[in-house]
Amino acid sequence: MRSNILETGVEGLLEAVLGEASGELYLINPSREILEVTIPAIESAEDVSVRLLAGERVLKDVLDDFIVGSTAADMIDADRLALRTYDGPTNTLVVSDDAVTAVVSAGGNVAGLVTDDDEFVSAARDQYAAAWEDAAPFKLRTPPITQVRSTLSDEIGTDVADDFDGVLTSLETARGNGDGLDEVTISLLVAAKNEELLYDISKWGEDVGIASKATFSRTKTRLEEMGLVDTEKVPIDVGRPRLRLVLGDDRLQETSSDDLANVAQSLIAS
């Protein structure tokens, strides 16, 4: 008999469940809290691929965070994660080849209630395999973080890519709703830190799938109005001059990439 699992947090519970599993498993109806830690837990697990069935609103809310969404896109590219929408009434379940685990929270702890009864496990897998076939795929529009890093390094420069990573590492979330800077703002700030051209960073961002050139231009204007970035005209042989991005506030100019996000957020809030 499999033992039940008791942890103080969802992350530890998922790591324990995924660490004991192998092959393809189903994760059914995760809450926002569970989904947020599911992606890094899958990334850490070596021998599993996950078919994830969740509410469309939950998927949109959680994966709108660039940090989570871009990592999920990496897992999808590696065939270790697939996403479909599901609105069936059930607890959060993890269904592997040989066990079903129900995730239950109570008293500040999280428990994984486990059964490995062959007949029950087989029935559960059949049920959720059928639900999977009926479910609509969830379209994740965020590009994979590996692709973002490699193209940024190749097309703009390794210093910009390193600064981009440094800013992401310093943030808990990157969704631009007041809880963090979004991916377009981060791209523009690190481009300004390295005095890159607006045309180059916005073309890269559109090509890799972060946002359109128009979105980059609007965000640049907003950052200019707040005094975070400035631009300098750079003449070219044919056509209108290009704009070079530079940091517009002395406090930003004096920070490392690790502190850039915190300083930028404090300036935005002020």
Image: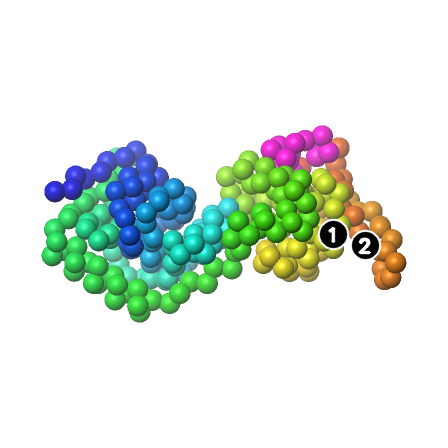
Asked whether, in this view, residue 74 is left or right of residue 151, the answer is: left
Q: Is residue 204 above or below residue 270?
A: below
Asked whether, in this view, residue 160 is left or right of residue 58, the answer is: right
Query: In this rendering, does residue 265 appear at all?
Result: no
Residue located at (72% from left, 41% from top): 194
Within the image, what quadrant is residue 209 found in? bottom right
- Magenta stretch, residue numbers: 251-266
Examine the residues drawn in magenta and state their main secondary structure.
helix
Residue marked by disc 1:
198
Asked whether, in this view, residue 230 is left or right of residue 218, the answer is: right
Q: CA distance from mark 2 to mark 1?
A: 7 Å
Residue located at (65% from left, 32% from top): 256
Mark 2 vs mark 1: which is more N-terminal?
Answer: 1
Q: Residues within 10 Å of mark 2 (few under 14, many from 20)?
A: some
Q: Position of residue 117 (x, y in %)?
A: 12, 51
Name the quarter where the C terminus is drawn.
top right
Q: Is residue 258 magenta?
A: yes
Q: Is residue 19 above or below residue 213?
A: above
Tag 2 and tag 1, C-beta contact below 8 Å? yes
Tag 1: amino acid: Leu
Within the image, what quadrant is residue 237 found in? bottom right
Residue marked by disc 2:
242
